[in-house]
Image (tube, rainbow, N blue to C red):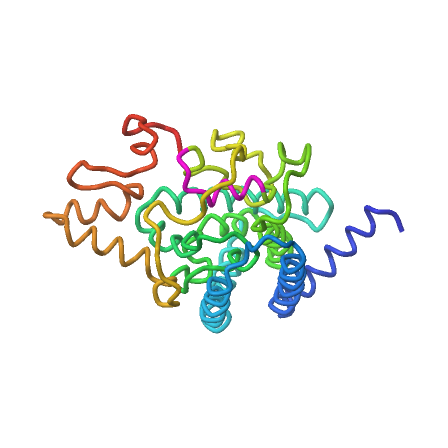
């Protein structure tokens, strides 16, 4: 059996298992293995770059989020995907180019939804939880909130169903995409040579979590760097980033991790004098202010309002 046949067999096996209710255990087992490897590596690193309090906060937060996703939202997301797939306008076959197409479409959907989440006030309030840690490790990869609704607020994925990507195929390519997305949350991997120009490596994704001015709203991709390069949002890592938020969250409480962004958004909306301004906070970019004292990415960089830069 050659390499291509082996890859095809692995993909088909994963797709079958994903489509028959084993996706959670495959993902969970893989993630736990990666966490163990990284934690052991930190023990032997020497330099104290592991915040135990932040780590346990991430564990507790992940348990809350995963419980809701597994018991409530996961079934809804799959149900919506199945409904859209039943009304598809085409079908993607289970052949090699079908797998490539599904992977590329999934990666593009991730980029689009991720970029919108960073550039829209309401969605950023939800996505804030993922960026609220001042650390960068594999535990941060799963730092999220139940307000994310298991992916319901990432509607671009359902376009894959519309064009005919089979649910099992989608779950399989999503698994491999998420696997790489977890990996690129580590600080233990430096530069990866020529791959830095084509893949969302750990170095490229560290930029995305940085609050340093050149790093703001950059490197949205999950696996392929082509979308960031194509749409002008790529930034190479030049200096070690400062992780977290522009307005840092000084809390390890699960409640704050889950709701900090929404708390901040609600406070800004309450301060607005009119309902028009209050509603604008929902769709204007993060940092927009009704009084004109903006702290958007453009304002921080000194760019004119309305710049096409992300």
Q: Seen in the image, is 205 located left or right of residue 101?
A: left
Q: Seen in the image, is 37 located left or right of residue 286?
A: right
Is residue 207 magenta-colored?
yes
Q: Up-down: is 230 above or below 169?
A: above
Q: Position of residue 73 (x, y in %)?
A: 45, 67
Tally of numbered tags: 0
Q: Main secondary structure of the magenta part?
A: helix
Query: In the rendered image, is residue 75 in sight?
Result: no
Q: Seen in the image, is 278 located left or right of residue 306?
A: left
User: Magenta residues, as a range?
Assistant: 203-213
Who's the residue at 30% across and 57% down the image?
262
Q: Up-down: is 166 above or below 193?
A: below
Q: Looking at the image, which is closer to me, 180 or 239?
A: 239
Q: Position of residue 172 (x, y in %)?
A: 64, 56
Give the image quarter of residue 107: top right
Is residue 49 magenta-colored?
no
Q: Looking at the image, which is closer to me, 188 or 9?
A: 188
């Amino acid at each position: 059996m050659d390499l291509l046949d082996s890859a095809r067999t692995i993909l088909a096996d994963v797709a079958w298992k994903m489509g028959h209710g084993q996706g959670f255990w495959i993902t969970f087992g893989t993630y736990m293995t990666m966490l163990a490897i990284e934690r052991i590596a930190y023990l032997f690193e020497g330099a104290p770059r592991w915040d135990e309090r932040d780590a346990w906060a991430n564990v507790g937060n992940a348990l809350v989020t995963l419980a809701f996703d597994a018991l409530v939202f996961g079934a809804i997301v799959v149900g919506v995907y199945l409904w859209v797939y039943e009304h598809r306008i085409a079908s993607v076959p289970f052949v090699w180019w079908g797998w490539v197409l599904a992977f590329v479409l999934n990666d593009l959907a991730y980029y689009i939804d991720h970029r919108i989440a960073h550039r829209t006030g309401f969605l950023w309030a939800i996505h804030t939880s993922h960026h609220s840690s001042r650390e960068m490790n594999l535990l941060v990869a799963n730092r999220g909130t139940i307000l994310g609704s298991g992916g319901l607020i990432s509607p671009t994925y359902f376009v894959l169903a519309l064009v005919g990507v089979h649910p099992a195929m989608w779950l399989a390519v999503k698994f491999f995409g998420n696997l790489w997305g977890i990996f690129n949350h580590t600080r233990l991997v430096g530069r990866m040579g020529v791959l830095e120009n084509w893949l969302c490596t750990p170095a490229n994704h560290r930029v995305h979590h940085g609050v340093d001015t050149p790093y703001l709203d950059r490197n949205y991709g999950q696996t392929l760097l082509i979308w960031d390069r194509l749409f002008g949002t790529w930034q190479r890592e030049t200096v070690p980033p400062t992780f977290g938020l522009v307005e840092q969250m000084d809390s390890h409480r699960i409640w704050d991790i889950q709701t900090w962004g929404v708390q901040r958004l609600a406070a800004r909306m309450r301060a607005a004098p009119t309902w028009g301004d209050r509603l604008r906070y929902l769709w204007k970019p993060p940092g927009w202010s009704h009084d004109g004292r903006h702290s958007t990415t453009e304002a921080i960089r000194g760019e004119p309002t309305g710049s096409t830069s992300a």
